[in-house]
Amino acid sequence: MRSPFYVRAKSVCCKIRANGGVRGTAPILTLSLLLGASILLLAGCKTATVPPVAAPPVTAPSTSIPGSFPLTISDSRGQTLKIPSAPQHIISLTPSNTEILYAIGAGAQIAADTTACDFPPEAKTIAHIDALSPSIEAIEAKSPDLVIALDTINGKMIEMLDKAGVPVLVVRAKTLEQTYEAISLIGTATGHQAQAEQTVKAMKDRIAVVTQKLASTQGNAQDGQPGRSTPSRVFVMYGDSPIYTTGPDSYISDLIKIAGGVNVVIEPLAGDVISPEKVVELEPDVIICSPELQKKALQMPGWAMGVPAVRNSRFFVTSQGATLERPGPRLAAAAEELAAFLHPEAFAASDTMASHSSSAPSVTTPGSVAPGQPSTHDSPVPTGKP
Amino acid sequence: MPTDMPPTPASETSEETAISRRQLRQARKALSPHGRSGRIFFALTVIFLLVLVVDMWMGEAGVADVVTPRVIGNVLLRHLPFIGSNFAPPSGVRYADAIVWDQRFPRALGAAMIGAMLAMAGVAFQSLLNNPLADPYTVGVSSGSALGAMVVTLLGGTGLLAGFAQPIAAFVTGLGAVTVVYMLARVGGQVSARTFLLSGIIVGTFFWSLIPLMVSLGNRSGIDRRSAILSELLGNLNALGWSKVGLLFVFGTIGAAILWRGSEELDIMALGEESAAYLGVDTEAFKRRVILAGSLLTAAAVSVAGIIAFVGFVVPHMARRLVGANHRVLLPASMLLGGTVLVASEWLSRVYLHSIEIGVVTSILGVPIFCVMLRRNLMQG
């Protein structure tokens, strides 16, 4: 069979004059050189377990950073971590951890955060690591003395950083309780234990007020108690193809419960993916999603008729000062807003959200941004820094 | 044994065959431009080493300020086998060793090996099938291997068998795919090049249709596996450490050895299957051997880096233009060129393109080159 390929080979053959010594040693030599080089390198790499380079002398922690260093703590995955002195070059790999760091007054110790970190506003002014495809070189080049990661998001990066010998504090913040623990853990690791406890206490206080308010006006919001009306059925929506949601063991579920509703997703789903049909079957009264997703929800086939939330246009969006997307200090404000959305009667009866918000205990860390309130500080320098 | 043909029954049968073989040997020598090949090899090696150095040298903006050439040189010196301990570590750059020695170096080396392996597989398939359109992708091996690698990722077995589970699964499914192709194309004990390619495309398409299924299942199995599957789909060198380099080395050496020993037969196959059979090549057995080697090379590359298109396609053509069709020269030239192309793509992607998946870069670079070569071939008639 004579294919075009043959013609090509033959034309080469004809063009070039026959000459001896084609089986020259050059290619073989090159090949063996390369192979030899790679064997050498492989042999070299086995013996090359050089101990990590000694840390450059960190400026001695001044007395204004409390906490007892050096300390050994165990992070959320149970890994013990030795922190020789108060970290001064922290890299935060998730927006939630960045918010926590600022809230507990460790903002000045952050060397870099991610491109997704937009709260508080000063988080946008420091160096960024790409949030979607973080490059490990970019992290290492900053010579961090502590990297703070979230186990649900940074899985692969944590593995790579561990391998490279970079100290990583992994926090888990799936539930509300774990979010409190994460704040405490970050506080301890950065030398801001007292402020962290204060932040957690402030959050708990605000949430307690919400619970109390709902209980006093209705007495029916708590599950297990018979009430005049059934609690609102809430569905959390993250994407549209596929639709991501949040199962029962999550901080959002906890907050929905606090705000006097129930998460319609009562069983954990594989990968938190749910089918549009299942949503219709669950009949949510309220959908929590971003404004962009609202349009998608309206266009979902069958939802306009089948889903009460879409039929009645009941979508919940948090304000600037609150968030349901990041397990951090702003969750308390989100709980207030969601409770007011689900039970306007409980909150309209006594006072407005605004006055309530200001009457609630807020974080008093000097210089840091109190959760739930837009920052008015133009020189955000926490006093914790020398 | 297969390289330097011992007298086979075929050559004993007639005097004619013996004469043709002698003539062929001379013709084969003529396949490669003499005199040029030495210089071309020198140039290719220099360019390859240059690209390798540039790739290790440069980092993305922000990293380059910290990890300077001085730091890189220091790290490399300190990792030299005997004199390394005489040098002091660089001050101020805490993770220089991790960046240079544990990440950049193995990645550059692994990229070079993957490029070389894909190019070799491309040469093997093109020569074997006598078809310029053949490459690991069009004969169905790439998509088959990708499927196997993805299944292992999906089941969370990437760490099994000391990391060899994935390449072995990729090899098995890749070989399975190409076996189906082979069976489909086999008519009356013969496999024609044209039908082989056609059935390769059909089987490849079938495997491609299973890959979205993998992605969809990956969506449900957690964020880590999902991103791993996506990077396998687009080609990614991020996780290339020393262990992967070792793995590539093992598979690459075996595949290269098989092809190198069969290079004379590959030359003969270029004259057509019938002629090759007359000249004493057991064509069916040889085809199986080359397909095995090509699958081995492709499977290792795919399981480490995912699907990297066009390297196995364009590089053999470029190499053939440079050094001719003699496989003793063509194979090493393709290896060098393939390594150069992939390392250069890796460098472009990491330094300038925000670490975009490398398969995207090779496609962007490869398609225009292929178009130019296609036009040239058409013009030459």
Image (cartoon, grey):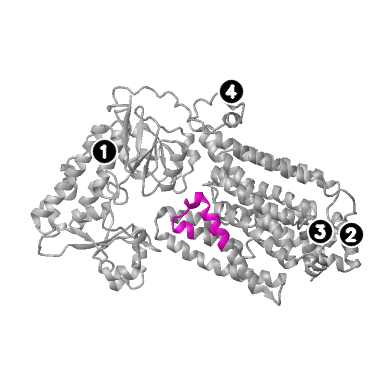
Q: Which residues are magenta?
A: B151-172
Chain identity of mark 4: B
Instruction: Give the spatial CA distance, label 4 vs label 3.
Output: 54 Å
Question: The residue marked by circle 2 belongs to what chain?
Answer: B
Secondary structure beneath dot 3 equals: loop
Residue B368 in view, yes or no:
no
Q: Which residue is mark 2?
A: B22
Disc 4 is placed on an element classified as helix
- Magenta span: chief secondary structure: helix
Q: Position of residue A24 (x, y in %)?
A: 82, 46
Separation of marks 4 and 2 at Cα, in angstroms: 58 Å
**Are the residues flagged by discs 3 and 2 in contact, CB closer than 8 Å?**
no
Which residue, given by chain and number where applicable, does mark 4 sit on? B86
> Do dots 1 and 2 share one subunit?
no
Marks 3 and 2, how far apart at CA: 14 Å
Q: Chain of mark 3?
A: B
In the rendering, which numbered label is found on residue B6?
3
Do discs 1 and 3 belong to a common subunit? no
Q: Are marks 1 and 3 in contact (CB under 8 Å)?
A: no
Q: Which residue is mark 1?
A: A184
Q: Is residue A280 magenta?
A: no
**Residues at discs 4 and 2 in contact (Cβ within 8 Å):** no
Establish whether labels 1 and 4 are both on one chain. Answer: no
Q: Quadrant of the C terminus of chain B?
A: bottom right
Vertical position of residue A240 compared to residue B346: above or below: below
Question: Disc 4, disc 3: CB below 8 Å?
Answer: no
| Quadrant in the rendering for residue B56 | top right
Alpha carbon distance from label 1 to label 3? 77 Å
| Amino acid beneath label 3 | Pro
**Amino acid under disc 1:** Ser
Q: Chain of mark 1?
A: A
Compared to A38, does B11 lie above or below?
below
